[in-house]
Image (tube, grey):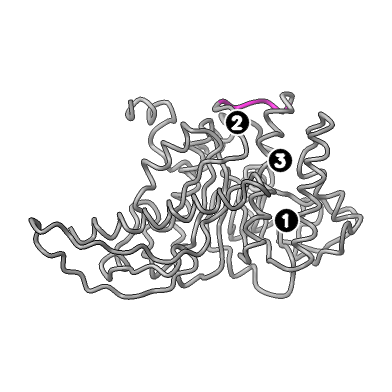
Amino acid sequence: MAQEHVYKVLFFLQSAAFIAFVINYSQKSDVVFAPVRQSPPVRQSPPATTAPRECKCIEATIRTAFDAAAVCKDVLESRGKISNCTLADINRRPGVVLLTTTNLAFLDVTLNMLESIKRTGVCVNTTVIAEDKKVFEQLRMRLDGDLAYRVLLTNSGEMDVIEHPRSHGSQYYGLMNKRQAYILALLQEGYEVLFSDADTFWFRDPFPFFEGDFDISLIDSVNPFGVRSGKSNFCAGFVYFKPTNASLQFVKAWVDALDSNKKKGRYTPDQNVMNGLLKSDKPVYVKIKPLDTNIFPYGPKFYDLLAKKANYSTVVMHAASIRGHEAKVTKFKSSDMWLVNKTTNEMLAEST
């Protein structure tokens, strides 16, 4: 009973913080990000007809998952059903948010990524932004109660639940071009942000590779060993951002450029805009830490290395350049990297 009460308190805290955020930012921004700091809710006395709820609670300031919340010890030590992480585990990585976005068409792919993360033992405050109500409901149902995850429904306009080809620019790139605003909002709150596309597969903990003096860290498909050059082609699907002045200026310019193109009826790929800004040092020079693509490979390179039995210990693989949901799933299955035992349709059928 005590644990149930604490979960209700934590859920109230999340909801109140999120509502406050929406009200505060509705006049300034149309993005959603992790709830801001709130005071803990006032605990009410239980009804006289119920037995007293005994719980040896500890006061904990947990910036990553909850802020200034009274957390019971049994909750602090309980493990999430999906993440296998305790709140104490999550709090060991303060000030860092793993961010991903998804729609219903990629529900199973998203869950596959989360399962791969679980198997690495990585525990981090994770925000999943659902781009439609159906995927929001499915993810909330599966992740509810797991303190590693916060699932938020976008308030910047819902997208279609189906997968669109690249030729449907307003839908395909319309979805891709929303995430930069989410990243910016988190950076403005002082968080370090690891943005990961849902079609990644994690083999090892990537966070040790994000140490050092830099603004952003990402892969360059042209230079495999992480040496920046004028010919670099950076990938926007797996990027670590530090909340530096340069990062903030750069991401703001990225968001503004995409918004400007949208107003003109153009849906330019976000990655093209990003590379254009980086190569021209606009609006500022960004200190980049390129990732070695032998251990952070994109899709075709990963399978090429696999076929050659190359002796590289992959950290995270991103199924970029493997186009389409079915092609990605087929490739994952071919290399024993498909960890989900139900299709999205089967999951939907179970919940009706």
Q: How many marks?
A: 3
Q: Are marks 1 and 3 in contact (CB under 8 Å)?
A: no
User: What residue does disc 2 label?
Assistant: 159
Give the residue at x 49% y 52%.
18
Count residues near mark 2 (Cα–Cα under 10 Å), then give few for <14, some for 14-19, many for 20+: some
Q: CA distance from mark 2 to mark 1?
A: 28 Å
Q: Is residue 88 left or right of residue 283?
A: left
165 falls in the magenta region: yes
| x, y percent for residue 324 | 62, 30
Q: Which residues are drawn in magenta?
A: 162-166
State whether residue 246 is above or below residue 347.
below
User: What residue does disc 1 label?
Assistant: 219
Name the foreground residue: 196 vs 306: 196
* Earlier residue among tags 1 and 3: 3
Amino acid, disc 2 = Met
Q: Is residue 229 left or right of residue 32?
A: right
Q: CA distance from mark 1 to mark 3?
A: 19 Å
| x, y percent for residue 202 | 53, 54
Q: Are marks 2 and 1 in contact (CB under 8 Å)?
A: no
| x, y percent for residue 279 | 89, 55
| x, y percent for residue 173 | 71, 34
Screen quadrant of the N terminus:
bottom left
State whether residue 264 is above or below residue 62.
above
User: What residue does disc 3 label?
Assistant: 177
Amino acid, disc 3 = Asn
